[in-house]
Amino acid sequence: MTTRENIVLVGPGRAGCSLARGLTRAGHRLAAIVGGSPENRRAVAAALGDVPVVPHAAALGMASLVIIAVPDDRLVDVATALAEGTPAAPTTLAFHVCGAKGRSVLDPLAARGARTAAWHPLRSLPVRDLGPSGLDGALVAIESDPADLPRLESLARAVNGRPASLDGRRRDTYHAGAAAAGNGILAVFDLGMRALMRAGIPEELARRALATLAEGAVANAGRTGPSAALTGPVVRGDAETVAAHIRALRRDLGDADAAFYAALSEALVRVAAARPDGAKASSVRRVLNEPGNS
Ligand SMILES: NC(=O)c1ccc[n+]([C@@H]2O[C@H](COP(=O)([O-])OP(=O)(O)OC[C@H]3O[C@@H](n4cnc5c(N)ncnc54)[C@H](OP(=O)(O)O)[C@@H]3O)[C@@H](O)[C@H]2O)c1
């Protein structure tokens, strides 16, 4: 640990408590929390121990590090409320942990002398403490002044995250990528489940079987990248099988699912193009371009 931070946590929810707990495990000090409803106090105390609750206006003046982990739609109001209080010392750093919004949402704090950043842990934080494994090697995407990067990277490593600098002009692109991999994959999983169940496989078995299949594909993609991990009819260039799939889905599940599968197949042709044998997959485009197959 380089410097021991004196932390004020604004928003003692799932993300905030997880990070604050992880940082105190790493030797930093949690000085106070801001916000949190009375009905959640017991859960917060269970996660963080007996920490004083202070008003928004006190936060900037008493912290070396302000972690803002409020719901995304409260960020603007919270930044304004924090900025109405005591000014920050020149080394005070305030960051928020929202993936969808940039560092500029904290401009009111910068105007009060704080250094500001966006520090987004790319993983689900479902409870108020992640345990000793912390972020478990997850990416922490950082948007900051370059001078603050080493400090922010060190905080990420302290909770077992892997820091990387994010180009703030591409934040929406970054967040869309995360949503595609983290959420979009579930639309594909849902299509898979309904198709198996329509073919007579019991629901729970379908769920478990597809999870095993998908976990294998995702683990391989994590090791080698998606194009090398690709298997199945598209990468084999088996256009007739893809056409049969589209017809069957249209008959058994409807037009929307058939069109979704066709769009997935088209996307897989593009994924396959990065392989040395990628040209085989392009023959699938022929059937996708036939009337009724897209
Ligand atoms: N959870 C995740 O998986 C995850 C992962 C990465 C990033 N994030 C980011 O973390 C942030 C918080 O998300 P979360 O999932 O932790 O939400 P959450 O569990 O609902 O926690 C939000 C916290 O903010 C408090 N709060 C609400 N309004 C406030 C205000 N005006 N001032 C101070 N505190 C206030 C809430 O208090 P009460 O609820 O007690 O009223 C609660 O303690 C978001 O920006 C989210 O995008 C979340």
Image (cartoon, rainbow, N blue to C red):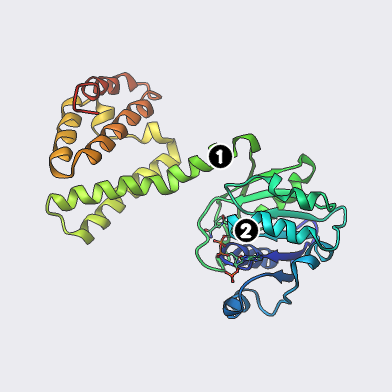
Query: What residue is pinned by disc 2?
Result: 74
User: Cα distance, mark 2 to mark 1?
Assistant: 19 Å
Per the rendering, the mark at residue 152 is: none
Q: Which of 42 and 79 is in front in this view?
A: 79
Q: Is tag 2's residue or tag 1's residue first in the polypeptide sequence?
A: 2
Residue 113 appears in the rendering: yes
Looking at the image, residue 97 lies above or below residue 164: below
Residue at 18% in and 42% down: 254
Query: What residue is pinned by disc 1?
Result: 172
Looking at the image, residue 120 lies above or below residue 292: below
Amino acid bearing label 2: Arg
Residue 157 appears in the rendering: no
Answer with left or right where residue 64 lies relative to residue 255: right
Quadrant for residue 222, please give it.
Answer: top left
Amino acid bearing label 1: Asp
The C terminus: image quadrant? top left
Q: Nearer the viewer, residue 46 or 88?
A: 88
Answer with left or right where residue 55 lies relative to residue 39: right
Whole-percent x and y of residue 285?
27, 22
